Image (cartoon, rainbow, N blue to C red):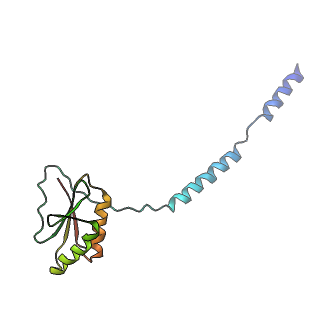
Amino acid sequence: MRKHIASIKVETEENEINLTPMLDVVFIMLIFFIVTATFIRETSIEANRPDQQDQPQVVQEEGAILIIIDNNDDIWMNGLIIDDRAVRPNIQRLHAEDPDRPVVIQAEPDSSAESLVAVMDASRQADVYNISITAGT
């Protein structure tokens, strides 16, 4: 019986699991994720949107170039629907008449961001950088 108990004791010692290689792999993975996470740069634009709780409608600045983008992404200037390719020439013409005129873009909530960015790009291409964005009703 005594030999039998000794052999059981030896078997339990041989069945131990060595955790050192697993911990090494975990630490290497941790270092890898920390190093790669520091090189990721998020590109974004911070927008300070005004609260729309019980505020009156934005009054148009006197003499501003007003561009309206409706829910169907139609672009309105001077009461007419214009093509997105005609935005820059119209802004250039109006800006040439009065160089101090800002551009006010009134975008409806259901309009796409693509239309808004296209109008902003057209304004910058027309060398007008004083751009205000308002939310439509």
Judge by depth and name the residue closer to the eye, 61 or 20.
Answer: 61
Residue 27 rendering spot, x and y as whole percentages: 62, 51
Q: Tell whether 96 sits left or right of 41.
A: left
Judge by depth and name the residue closer to the eye, 19 or 35.
Answer: 35
Q: Residue at x 69, y 42 (%)?
A: 19
Q: Compared with residue 47, is residue 124 higher up or lower down, i.e. above or below?
A: below
Q: Quadrant of residue 121?
A: bottom left
Residue 4 rendering spot, x and y as whole percentages: 87, 22
Q: Compared with residue 3, is residue 93 higher up or lower down, i.e. above or below?
A: below
Q: Quadrant of residue 136?
A: bottom left
Q: Quadrant of residue 84?
A: bottom left
The quadrant in which the N terminus is found is top right
Q: Residue at x 49, y 61 (%)?
A: 40
Q: Residue at x 25, y 57 (%)?
A: 49
| Label tally | 0
Q: Residue at x 15, y 80 (%)?
A: 97
Q: Compared with residue 87, is residue 136 higher up or lower down, i.e. above or below?
A: above
Residue 24 rendering spot, x and y as whole percentages: 67, 50
Residue 124 rendering spot, x and y as whole percentages: 29, 73
Q: Tell whether 74 sits left or right of 36.
A: left
Q: Tell whether 32 sits left or right of 112.
A: right
